[in-house]
Image (tube, grey):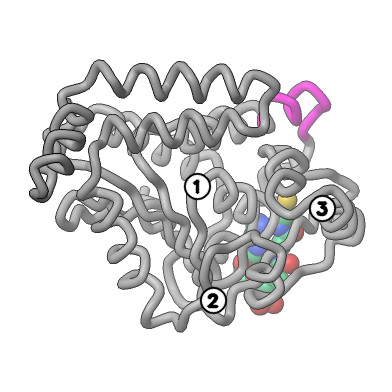
Amino acid sequence: MDQTIVTNLIEGILIVTISRPDKLNALNNRVFDELNQILDDAEFNHEIKSVIIIGSGMKAFVAGADISEFIGLSAAEGKALAKKGQDTFFRIENSRKPFIACVNGFALGGGCELAMSCHIRIASENAKFGQPEINLGLIPGYGGTQRLTNLIGKGRAMEMIMTGNMIDAVTALQFGLVNNVVSQEELLPTAINLLQTINSKSSNAIAACIQAINAATTEDGFTIEGESFGNCFGTEDMKEGVNAFLEKRKAFFLGK
Ligand code: COA
């Protein structure tokens, strides 16, 4: 069976392309299995400093969970499906390494949820975002009700999820759902450029940023921020960063 994901490692940046172009890159069971294998590798492979997720082709990032796999599922099987999606997207959100979603077209349902689990989203001008599950008599099940609310606010999330209407890239920018909107051609170069900056920092401090910022939406966010801040003081990178500043030279971080 053909791979559903293609990967490419360029200067420490792993480019993960969801590749089911004839199904607008919809997330079936196999995509989830391959994505989890890639997440295993990204976690332990020191050559991978950060990750980009993009869809194959020019039309879709990911047009949702594969609806053909919904047929005949019981309530218990539906819950298991949600758990698999949620667990996978938690792994992305809580990764020590930064993930950028390059949203190069439709990001619907599970596609929007996948993009929202990444730490940063950049959209191409043709991108469209939506949670159309309501049109199937469903609600988002891979974290969409939570992450969309956190990113764009309760009223806007309510409207998007209850109508199923899509928003375009400019509206997504205005809502704070994406950081930037660029042309299709500029999408990957913009993300790579951003990650080159991030990859030049201390990997320990970057992991601490992710952990602390993620905790902003939990009650103990301030506690986790304080702990993560304190933990940085035990690293070689922090000593190097402080010394480099005081010695008026560029810091050289080793990720220790
Ligand atoms: N699951 C399974 N197959 C999907 C899919 C999904 N989420 N989204 C698109 N596809 C398939 C279509 O069935 C079609 O397959 P086919 O050629 O074998 O018939 C192919 O991808 C192309 O999609 P098509 O609908 O013909 O393209 P379009 O340009 O007319 O419309 C969309 C694009 C994105 C508006 C439309 O495909 C759509 O609404 N998809 C479903 C979105 C959705 O509800 N996602 C949430 C799922 S919970």
> Going by the image, does 7 lie left or right of 241?
right
Sequence-wise first label, 3 or 2: 2
Whether 171 is drawn above or below 79: the answer is below
Question: Residue 30, how many percent across, how many down?
Answer: 47, 41
Which comes sooner in the sequence, label 1 or label 2? 2
Nearer to the camera, 98 or 135: 98
Q: Quadrant of the C terminus?
A: top left
Q: Is residue 235 left or right of residue 36?
A: left
Q: CA distance from mark 1 to mark 2?
A: 20 Å
Circle number at residue 157:
3
The three-letter amino acid code for the residue at tag 3 is Ala
Residues drawn in magenta: 73-81
The residue under label 1 is 118
Amino acid on which the number 2 mark rests in the picture: Lys
For residue 206, say whether it is visible.
Answer: yes
Picture disc at residue 127: none
For the residue labelled by badge 3, is the local secondary structure a helix, a strand or a loop?
A: helix
> What label sits on residue 59 in the rendered view?
2
Judge the density around disc 3: few (<14), some (14-19), many (≥20) Cα neighbours within 10 Å: many
Q: Main secondary structure of the magenta part?
A: helix
Instruction: Tell me which residue sits at (59%, 23%) in the image.
Output: 222
Whether residue 165 sits left or right of residue 56 in the image: it is: right
Determine if the C-beta at disc 2 is less than 8 A from ligand 1: yes
x then y, percent, for residue 217 = 67, 32
Q: What is the three-letter code of the residue carrying label 1?
A: Cys
In the picture shown, does residue 4 fall above or below 243?
below
Q: Secondary structure at mark 1?
A: loop
Q: CA distance from mark 3 to mark 1?
A: 18 Å
Q: CA distance from mark 3 to mark 2?
A: 24 Å
Beta carbon at label 3 within 8 Å of ligand 1:
no
